[in-house]
C-alpha cells in the first residue's frame, strides 16, 4: 500500500514538473531539454505510475480489510471456545463434587 502511494506521488510530481517547466517555445523537464517524444514518454510513464499506484493501493486496502475481518472472526471464535471450556470445567467440577 505504501508503494502504491509513493508511485502516485512520484507520478503526480512528474506531471506537475512537466506542466510548470514548459513554456511556449522551449520544452524542458526539470532543467533538461526534452523532445516532444521525450515529453510524451514522460507523461505516459507518469500516468502509468499513477494508475499502477492506485491499483496497488486498492489491492493493499482490500487485503488489509479482509485480514482484519478474519482476525475479528477468529477472536470471536476463540472467545466462544474459551467460554465453552470454562463451562465444561465448571460442569465437570460440580459433577465430581456430587459423586463423593
Image (tube, rainbow, N blue to C red):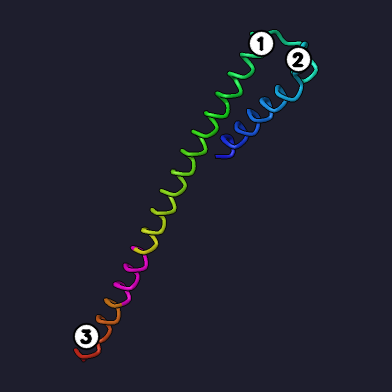
- Label 1 element class: helix
Residue identifier under label 1? 38
User: Tag 1 or tag 3, which sits nearer the N-term?
Assistant: 1
Kindly identify the residue that appears in the image at 21 percent across and 85 percent down.
95
Where residue 7 appears, as percent x and y from the top left, is 60, 31
Q: Which mark is residue 24?
A: 2
Of tags 3 and 1, which is closer to the observer?
1
* Label 3: how many Cα within 10 Å (few below 14, some 14–19, many 20+): few
Task: Give the image location of residue 91, x and y in percent.
Answer: 25, 81
**How many other residues sit within 10 Å of disc 1, few (<14), some (14-19) or many (≥20)?**
few
Residue at mark 3? 95
Q: Is residue 33 above or below residue 56?
A: above
Name the chief secondary structure element in magenta. helix
Closer to the chain start, of discs 1 and 2, is 2
Which residues lie in the magenta part?
77-86
Q: Nearer the viewer, mark 1 or mark 2?
A: 2
Residue 85 magenta-highlighted: yes
Amino acid at each position: 500500500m505504501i508503494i502504491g502511494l509513493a508511485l502516485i506521488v512520484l507520478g503526480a510530481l512528474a506531471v506537475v514538473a512537466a506542466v510548470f517547466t514548459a513554456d511556449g517555445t522551449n520544452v524542458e523537464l526539470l532543467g533538461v531539454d526534452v523532445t516532444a517524444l521525450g515529453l510524451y514518454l514522460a507523461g505516459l510513464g507518469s500516468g502509468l505510475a499513477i494508475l499502477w499506484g492506485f491499483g496497488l493501493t486498492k489491492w493493499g486496502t482490500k487485503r488489509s480489510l479482509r485480514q482484519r475481518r478474519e482476525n475479528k472472526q477468529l477472536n470471536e471464535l476463540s472467545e466462544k471456545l474459551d467460554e465453552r471450556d470454562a463451562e465444561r470445567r465448571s460442569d465437570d467440577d460440580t459433577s465430581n463434587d456430587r459423586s463423593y
